C-alpha cells in the first residue's frame, strides 16, 4: 500500500541535501571541536560554517547562535536563562507549545488568552506586565493551527518596558521569512527536525547584549552559554537545512500554500459540517486544522492511517494525552469540538495527486464514521 505523509509539523524527513552534508562529518570529521590538533580544528571549521549558515537564515550574527539539542532545550534555555530560575515574572500565552508552558509554570507567570482565531492582542501583553517581569514569550507561528502572531508589535511593547522578548520560532522558520533584527526579538528558538535536519539539534538566537544564564554547567562551549561537546554533525545538518531554506524556501512555501488551499477548499466543498480552525487569521502556508462535526479525531486518524495517510490531531509532544488540544480549547472550542479536529501539515514530499487522494480518503472515512455516530445523526 502506498503511504503519504501529511504530518510535517510533527517532524520532517531528513532532506537529501542535508543527509549528503551530514554523512561525511559523521565518518570523517570525528574530532572534538575544542581540540587544538588537526582533527579537532577540522570539526571546528565545520561547526563555524554551520553557525554562519544558521545565522544567515535568521539575519543574525554567527556569535548570536547557540546550538542546542532541539527546540525544547532552546525554549527552556531562553526562559530560565533570562529569568535566572524561579525569581522572575514571565508573561506568555495560553497558546504556547508545552516546552514554553511547562517551563513558565515553574515560576511566577501570567497567561494571556487568544481570540477565537488564535491571535494574541498585543495590548493584553502590555496589560500583563509587572515591575518584576523579566521575559515575554510568544510563539511566532502556532504548531497546531498555523496562526502567525504580531511579534513586531509585541517586541515594541517589550522594548518600551525594558523586558526581553523570546519567541518560539520552531514552526515559523522555513515557512515564512524570518529576520530576528526586523522582528525585534531578544531570543528566538528553532529546531532542526522541523526543517529537514535530523532530530537532536536546534538553536537559540541570543541577541548581542542579552544576559543569559546557562542551564548546564561544564566546559566553556558555545561562549559559555551551553556546556557540552558540540554535536558537529547535527550542526552541519542544521546549517545545510538553513542554507536550502535561504535559497529555496520562498518558492517552496508558495507551492505548499497552493496545495494547502486546494486541500482545504475541497474538504469544505465536499464534506458538510466542516470548519477551519483559525480561518481568517494569518497562517503559515503548509498548515490547516479542520473540525469535522460528529467525528472523534482518533477514529478518523486510525481510518486514514489504514488507508495510508499520516495526519495528526495536535502536537506530537502531546499525543496519547487523554485531554483535547489545549490550543483549540484556548481558542474557545468546546471539548467535543476540539476532539473533532484534525491537523494537516504539508511538506516538500507532498503533491497535488497526494492531496486529491487524501480528500477522497477523507470523504469515504467521514461518511462511514458519521453513520456510526449517533450524536451526529
Image (cartoon, rainbow, N blue to C red):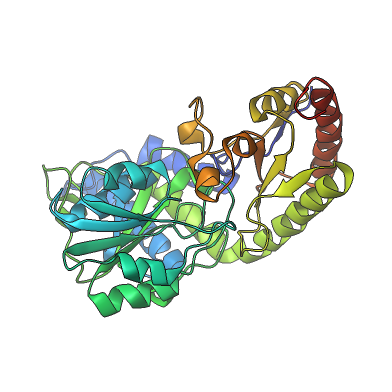
Q: Quadrant of the C terminus?
A: top right
Relative to 294, 322 lies left or right: left
Q: Which residue is drawn at 78% across and 46% down?
A: 351
Relative to 127, 40 lies left or right: left
Q: Nearer the viewer, residue 308 or 251?
A: 308
| Numbered-mark total | 0
Q: In which quarter of the image is the N terminus?
A: top right
Image x and y of residue 175, in percent? 57, 59
Image x and y of residue 135, in percent? 25, 61
Q: Which of 171 and 278 is in front in this view?
A: 278
Q: Nearer the viewer, residue 365 or 48?
A: 365
Q: Is residue 142 visible?
A: yes
Image x and y of residue 60, in percent? 36, 70
Q: Which of 303 and 7 is in front in this view?
A: 303
Image x and y of residue 41, in percent? 24, 51
Q: Can residue 59 be seen in this view?
A: no
Relative to 291, 191 lies left or right: left
Q: Residue at x 28, y 68 (%)?
A: 207
Amino acid at each position: 500500500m502506498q503511504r503519504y505523509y501529511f504530518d510535517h509539523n510533527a517532524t520532517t524527513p531528513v532532506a537529501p541535501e542535508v543527509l549528503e552534508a551530514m554523512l561525511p562529518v559523521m565518518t570523517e570529521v570525528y574530532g572534538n571541536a575544542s581540540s587544538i590538533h588537526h582533527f579537532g580544528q577540522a570539526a571546528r571549521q565545520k561547526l563555524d560554517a554551520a553557525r554562519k549558515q544558521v545565522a544567515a537564515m535568521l539575519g543574525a550574527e554567527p556569535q548570536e547562535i547557540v546550538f542546542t539539542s532541539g527546540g525544547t532545550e532552546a525554549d527552556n534555555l531562553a526562559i530560565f536563562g533570562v529569568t535566572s530560575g524561579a525569581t522572575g515574572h514571565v508573561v506568555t500565552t495560553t497558546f504556547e507549545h508545552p516546552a514554553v508552558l511547562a517551563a513558565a509554570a515553574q515560576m511566577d507567570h501570567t497567561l494571556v488568552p487568544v481570540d477565537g482565531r488564535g491571535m494574541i492582542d498585543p495590548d493584553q501583553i502590555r496589560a500583563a506586565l509587572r515591575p518584576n517581569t523579566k521575559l515575554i514569550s510568544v510563539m511566532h507561528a502556532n504548531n497546531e493551527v498555523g496562526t502567525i502572531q504580531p511579534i513586531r508589535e509585541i517586541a515594541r511593547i517589550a522594548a518600551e518596558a525594558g523586558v526581553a522578548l523570546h519567541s518560539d520560532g520552531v514552526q515559523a522558520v522555513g515557512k515564512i521569512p524570518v529576520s530576528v533584527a526586523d522582528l525585534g526579538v531578544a531570543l528566538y528558538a528553532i529546531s532542526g527536525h522541523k526543517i529537514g535536519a535530523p532530530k537532536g539539534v536546534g538553536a537559540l538566537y541570543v541577541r548581542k547584549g542579552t544576559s543569559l544564564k546557562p542551564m548546564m554547567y561544564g566546559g566553556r562551549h558555545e561562549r559559555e552559554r551551553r556546556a557540552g561537546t558540540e554535536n558537529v554533525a547535527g550542526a552541519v545538518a542544521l546549517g545545510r537545512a538553513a542554507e536550502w531554506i535561504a535559497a529555496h524556501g520562498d518558492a517552496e512555501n508558495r507551492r505548499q500554500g497552493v496545495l494547502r488551499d486546494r486541500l482545504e477548499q475541497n474538504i469544505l466543498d465536499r464534506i458538510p459540517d466542516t470548519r477551519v480552525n483559525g480561518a481568517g487569521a494569518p497562517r503559515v502556508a503548509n498548515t490547516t486544522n479542520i473540525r469535522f462535526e460528529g467525528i472523534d479525531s482518533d477514529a478518523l486518524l486510525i481510518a486514514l492511517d489504514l488507508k495510508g495517510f499520516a495526519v495528526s490531531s495536535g502536537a506530537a509532544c502531546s499525543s496519547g494525552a487523554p485531554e483535547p488540544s489545549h490550543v483549540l480549547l484556548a481558542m474557545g472550542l468546546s471539548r467535543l469540538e476540539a476532539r473533532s479536529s484534525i491537523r494537516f501539515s504539508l511538506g516538500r514530499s507532498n503533491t497535488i495527486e497526494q492531496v486529491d487522494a487524501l480528500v477522497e480518503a477523507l470523504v469515504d472515512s467521514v461518511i462511514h464514521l458519521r453513520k456510526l455516530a449517533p450524536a451526529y445523526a
